[in-house]
Amino acid sequence: MAKYFGTYGIRGKLDLLTPEFVLRMCAAFGRHVQGGKVILGRDVRTSGKMLRAAAIAGLISSGCEVIDLGVVPSPTVEFEIKKMGAKGGVIITASHNPPEWNALKFVGAEGVGISREKGEWVEELYGAGNVQAAWNRLGEARKYDLAIREHMDEIKKHINSAAIAKRRPLLVLDCGNGTVGNFAPYLFRELGCRVVTLNAQPDGFFPGRHSEPTKDNVADLIACVKALHADMGIAWDGDGDRVIFIDENGGYVWGDKSFALCIKLRMRQGKGVAVTTVATSDVAKEAAEKSGGKMEYVKVGAPYIAEKMLELNAAIGGEEVGGVVWPEISWGKDGLMTAAKIVEEVCASGKPLSAHIASLPAYFNAKGKVDCGSKDKARILAKIREEFAREKKAKAITLDGVRLNLSDGWVIARPSGTENYFRVFAEAKMQKRADELLAKFKKKVEEIVRKV
Ligand code: MG
């Protein structure tokens, strides 16, 4: 079991992410990929410059050629890895976490994130130490300033900008003081939109809003869309892989709905497989199946989505919090491409965003948590599997926690990766049924926790 790696990289505050730790871990990663080209990028956090220097030293020490992109969205690093055919990448970003956090996201060849399981191999090298290359095998580092321009041009190649320019939609972009401030306003202006920005200056203190684009955190954006009678509001998380939308009435569009809309428009171009996690709403599955495609499920975590997509040559992938993978760009969630695709769809169809969302099937959900204290989560999970298997006329999926598909809804119980609780989530076509399912299965989990 990996000690440091989570579902996508190593996240922590500076007591964990010291320069020494980052240097040694990046050296281990450099040895893992056996030298060669490694792309480096970072977000705007105050610790970013310090950790960048440590990461470069570690990568050079293990013989890597570091291409330093500077402050860029995470998807830009994943895009450049694929484009340059690099051996891998390191992204110094804590995504949507508070400003005092940071993280190392390690990315492998093709731009597929290093999962917890693959992270164990890097940790072994970290533990063994002595990964430094000989004096005549050390690597080097150079800056590369064209990444944002190239990523933007690649997105534009896949977007019908004439349809957008014809409508000249008014967009309010809330960059959340994150890395997309250097990217999104320029992209959408070039695509022919009228652009108003909020929090567009990248700032590691995140003075404008919290970097996770939850409904509460984007209240200013919602007010702005209404006041300006804009066509849409768009908000990203700190590193630009996730994006959420506000419709023309100021309505917050949940990530599973925007993902379902992306599946619909993608499958119109060509049917295929969509990949998502077991925690995603059935609205996505239904969108895929109604379009003649198919949905495949994986464990929760961006690297698992990317691995499966590569394996199946999938058409699209994504997760419920507003991250969508577009294989023509990269194998990482790309919040910039996702936003451009949705804007294109609204302009080309001539229908407002709210109408697109209203055309999707309605699902209702209910969420809960069960505290398990310091009890053994693996034992609890095994018991939950046994208990849930007793349920008649239900199909259990045990990729991650236990998901139980019932005739009129589904429920999932999953241990939190970092904290002492189990998440329980239920979904159905009616709110009442979702609440009932949650109450019933939450009680089962509580009883199991009490007995273990
Ligand atoms: Mg993110």
Image (spheres, rainbow, N blue to C red):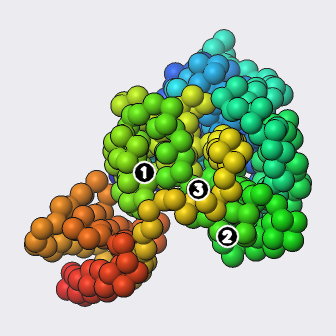
Relative depth, front residue between 291 and 125: 291
Q: Amino acid at mark 2?
A: Gly
In the figure, is residue 386 to the left or right of 225? Answer: left
Q: How many marks?
A: 3
The residue pinned by badge 1 equals 287
The answer to the question of whether label 2 and label 3 lie on touching residues, with beta carbons closer than 8 A, is no
Whole-angstrom CA distance, mark 2 to mark 3, is 13 Å
In the figure, is residue 204 to the left or right of 127? Answer: right
x and y percentages locating residue 245 in the rendered image: 67, 59
The answer to the question of whether label 1 and label 2 lie on touching residues, with beta carbons closer than 8 A, is no
Relative depth, front residue between 262 and 80: 262
Q: Amino acid at mark 1?
A: Ala
Q: Earlier in the sequence, mark 1 or mark 2?
A: 2
x and y percentages locating residue 100 in the rendered image: 72, 64
In the figure, is residue 285 to the left or right of 244? Answer: left
Residue 191 in sight here: yes
Whole-angstrom CA distance, mark 1 to mark 3, is 12 Å
SS for dot 1? helix
Q: Residue at x 39, y 34 (%)?
A: 272
Q: Residues within 10 Å of mark 2 (few under 14, many from 20)?
A: some
x and y percentages locating residue 108 in the rendered image: 52, 31
Residue 132 in sight here: no
Q: Is residue 30 above or below residue 399?
A: above
Residue 411, by quadrant, is: bottom left
Q: Residues within 10 Å of mark 1 (few under 14, many from 20)?
A: many
The residue pinned by badge 3 equals 356
SS for dot 3? helix
Whole-angstrom CA distance, mark 1 to mark 2, is 21 Å
Q: Is residue 37 above or below residue 42?
A: above
The residue pinned by badge 2 equals 251
